Image: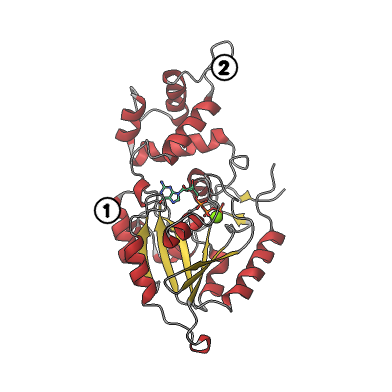
């Protein structure tokens, strides 16, 4: 299994974050609009509490707009400010800039530009957000985790300095549904998560909450069937076949995940604010369905 994230890396990333927090006035915590709970790093909560934190929900184009509005409303209670920004089109950036202007500058930093650090899980759209804030491509972006390797300062003319950082995950994700959502969102390298397992989890979730979208997308006869049967039907319909004609469930899973990530299954929000109990907001509870331990 590929090395994605292990305790030593996490400790180093936290050290870098702690050092850089001293230099900044505030933090932008980037969350995926489809999974605002699961994309929140529980390991850095205490560190972030030292500065005002603005939550930015990315990929609002892939999330249910009603749920995104509900999330913005509910997260406002916990964060200094909140905004939803499409990192691909820049929609929402003006509102975010307005919010950033209200951030207090640390007094000892005098008249120098407002400095912000951008943190978040891998592949959530941190570097894209910076490019949108700047109005041109100054950071490298890409559709897989681990694109940004080192912290990088970027200066905006309008008196803003931004520190882009590599994506951070925490070493032990002990809740399978959270691991599944992070994998579906592309935060975990695809090699880490068994594609078939991911496909089955995704179908189970879709069948329960978005059965009609699933049925329509793949022209399914029975979207309430067993997840494996549905996957087999998708494989047949999409020509995912092994030599000899058997269905290739792994290929069908990959196709399903790609469709989800590109919005072809519709606008899907995995986590709704109303559904989550207060204690679950901080940390996804251990659901007893096994660990995803991100080690070698
Ligand atoms: N649909 C959609 N895609 C987005 C959005 N924001 C970013 N992306 C895409 O998401 C992918 C990841 O974006 P990055 O900006 O590289 O993400 P990152 O958080 O910097 O990733 P790492 O540096 O690897 O941690 C890219 O393919 C972006 O084009 C958004 O709001 N909507
Ligand atoms: Mg990046």
In the image, residue 261 lies at what x, y percent? 44, 41
Q: Compared with residue 238, is residue 107 higher up or lower down, i.e. above or below? A: below
Judged left or right of residue 271, residue 22 is right
Query: How far is mark 2 from mark 1, CA to CA?
Result: 41 Å
Quadrant (top left, top right, bottom left, bottom right) of the N terminus: top right
Residue at the spot 42% in from the left edge and 69% down from the top edge? 54
Residue at the spot 47% in from the left edge and 18% down from the top edge? 239
In the image, residue 40 lies at what x, y percent? 49, 61
Under circle 1, the secondary element is helix
Residue at the spot 49% in from the left edge and 87% down from the top edge? 110
Colour setup of the view: secondary structure
Q: Is residue 76 visible?
A: no
Judged left or right of residue 212, residue 262 is right
Specify few, some or many for label 1: CA neighbours under 10 Å numbering under 14, 14-19, or 20 or more: few
Q: Are marks 2 and 1 in contact (CB under 8 Å)?
A: no
- Give 200 or 156, whichever is nearer the viewer: 156
The single residue placed furthest to the front in the displayed view is: 157
Specify few, some or many for label 2: CA neighbours under 10 Å numbering under 14, 14-19, or 20 or more: few
In the image, residue 21 lies at what x, y percent? 57, 75
Q: Compared with residue 70, is residue 156 higher up or lower down, i.e. above or below? A: below
- Give 180 or 72, whichever is nearer the viewer: 72
- Give 170 or 48, whichever is nearer the viewer: 48
Residue 19, picture quadrant: bottom right
Residue at the spot 53% in from the left edge and 76% down from the top edge? 24
The single residue placed furthest to the left in the displayed view is: 66
Q: Which mark is residue 66?
A: 1
Under circle 2, the secondary element is loop
Q: Which mark is residue 242?
A: 2
In the image, residue 117 lies at what x, y percent? 52, 69
Mark 2 and ligand 1: say if the CB distance to the nearest ligand atom is below 8 Å. no
Residue 67, picture quadrant: bottom left
């Amino acid at each position: 299994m590929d090395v994605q994230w292990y305790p030593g890396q996490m400790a180093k990333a936290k050290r870098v974050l702690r050092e850089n927090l001293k230099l900044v006035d505030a933090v932008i915590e980037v969350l995926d609009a489809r999974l605002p709970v699961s994309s929140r790093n529980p390991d850095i909560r205490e560190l972030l509490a030292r500065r005002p934190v603005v939550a930015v929900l990315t990929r609002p184009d892939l999330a249910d707009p009603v749920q995104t509005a509900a999330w913005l409303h509910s997260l406002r209670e916990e964060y200094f400010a909140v905004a939803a920004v499409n990192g691909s089109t820049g929609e929402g950036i003006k509102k975010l800039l307005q919010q950033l202007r209200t951030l207090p500058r640390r007094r000892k930093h005098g008249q120098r530009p407002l400095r912000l650090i951008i943190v978040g899980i891998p592949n959530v759209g941190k570097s894209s957000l910076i490019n949108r804030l700047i109005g041109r491509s100054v950071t490298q972006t890409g559709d897989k985790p681990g694109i940004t390797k080192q912290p990088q300062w970027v200066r905006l003319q309008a008196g803003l300095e931004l520190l882009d950082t590599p994506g951070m995950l925490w070493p032990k994700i002990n809740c399978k549904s959270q691991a599944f959502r992070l994998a579906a969102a592309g935060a975990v390298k695809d090699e880490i998560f068994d594609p078939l397992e991911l496909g089955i989890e995704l179908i189970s979730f879709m069948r329960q909450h978005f059965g009609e979208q699933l049925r329509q997308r793949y022209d399914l006869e029975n979207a309430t069937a067993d997840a494996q049967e549905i996957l087999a039907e998708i494989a047949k319909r999409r020509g995912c076949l092994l030599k000899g004609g058997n269905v290739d469930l792994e290929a069908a899973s990959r196709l399903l995940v790609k469709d989800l990530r590109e919005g072809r299954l519709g606008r899907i929000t995995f986590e709704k604010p109303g559904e989550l109990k207060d204690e679950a907001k901080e940390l996804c509870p251990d659901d007893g369905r096994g660990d995803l331990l991100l080690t070698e």
